[in-house]
Image (cartoon, helix red, strand yellow):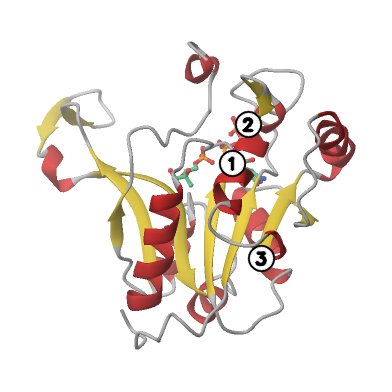
Amino acid sequence: MADQPTDSSSHQHFAIIVAGGSGSRMKTDVPKQFLLLGDKPILQRTIEQFLAVIPASQIILVLPARDLSTWNSLCEAHHFHPAIQIVTGGSSRFQSVRNGLMAIMSSAGIVAVHDGVRPFISPDIIRASYEVAAQTGSAVTCVPVKDSVRVVDQDGRSKAVDRTMYRLVQTPQTFRLDLFRQAFATDEQPFFTDCASVVEYAGFQVTLIEGSYENIKITTPDDLRGF
Ligand SMILES: Nc1ccn([C@@H]2O[C@H](COP(=O)(O)OP(=O)(O)OP(=O)(O)O)[C@@H](O)[C@H]2O)c(=O)n1
Ligand SMILES: C[C@](O)(CO)[C@H](O)COP(=O)(O)O
């Protein structure tokens, strides 16, 4: 890490929950974060996992501007009224994270960014990510690859690769705020698929922590089969 680690205990813990996407791959009428999982909206379940770890006042929820009323109606229907801050998203995940970051007024602290559509995250992993980020500057949740992996070239020829060298990246991705602000001061790049890639582009190395195979990102209809 380019920067020195800081003492964690003096810093507040924030969370940016990004739910500003349209869910095009899910192909439902409302964006997937608003679908019910059992008796509750997916997004409510995700927020509840963070409420088990940090106060509502330190959570920023990013929503699509056109869906604010959808979320308000769901909150009414499910009697869910946490005092979290809501900001509107942008046209990409990067833009949505940046909008969330601008809503955090504190200059010091630790911020976790989590996909609103990963409701199965455990409070233990969230806590671990804050602890590791306080010690090293970052904590990027991931799991080892369980299947065999091949790399495919432009002509369709494939070759087996050593799967022990790869990790599947999840969220939360948690960072020291000063470092995160510095990283997000950049122009958006096409290869920014997550926050770790933005932080790495700014010249910082990221620390990986163990996630969970249950912590799936609800992306396509298959992901909801069985619930
Ligand atoms: N402009 C965007 C795009 C995505 N996200 C959020 O980033 C998370 C991960 O993105 P993804 O699963 O790709 O969600 P969508 O962009 O909604 O889905 P799709 O790519 O299928 O349209 C989701 O919680 C999504 O709401 C966001 O806040 N703002
Ligand atoms: C951030 C993320 O969930 C980590 O796996 C993922 O990169 C989001 O990707 P998507 O293209 O927005 O689905």
Q: In this view, does 176 lie above or below 28?
A: below
Instruction: Categorize mark 3 by other alpha carbons within 10 Å: few (<14), some (14-19), many (20+).
Output: some
Mark number displayed over residue 58: 3
Q: In this view, does 63 lie above or below 139?
A: above
| Residue found at x 53% / y 27% | 219
Q: Distance between the residues labelled 2 and 3?
A: 20 Å
Q: Distance between the residues labelled 1 and 2?
A: 6 Å
Instruction: Categorize mark 1 by other alpha carbons within 10 Å: few (<14), some (14-19), many (20+).
Output: many
- Mark sitting earlier along the chain (2/3): 2
Query: Which quarter of the figure has residue 33?
Result: top right
Foreground: 64 or 49? 49
Q: Where is residue 105 in the image (x, y as percent from the top left)?
A: 71, 78
In the picture as drawn, the residue positioned furthest to the top comes out as: 226
**Seen in the image, is 57 located left or right of residue 139?**
right
| Residue found at x 71% / y 51% | 62
Q: In this view, does 90 lie above or below 133?
A: above
Q: Name the residue under label 2.
A: 42
Foreground: 69 or 220? 69
Query: Which quarter of the figure has residue 37?
Result: top right
Task: Using the rendered image of the protein, determine whether residue 203 is visible from the camera's viewpoint.
Answer: no
* Residue type, label 2: Ile
Q: Quadrant of the N terminus?
A: bottom left
Foreground: 20 or 193? 20
Q: Name the residue under label 1.
A: 46
Disc 1 vs disc 2: Cβ atoms closer than 8 Å? yes
Mark number displayed over residue 23: none
* Residue type, label 3: Gln
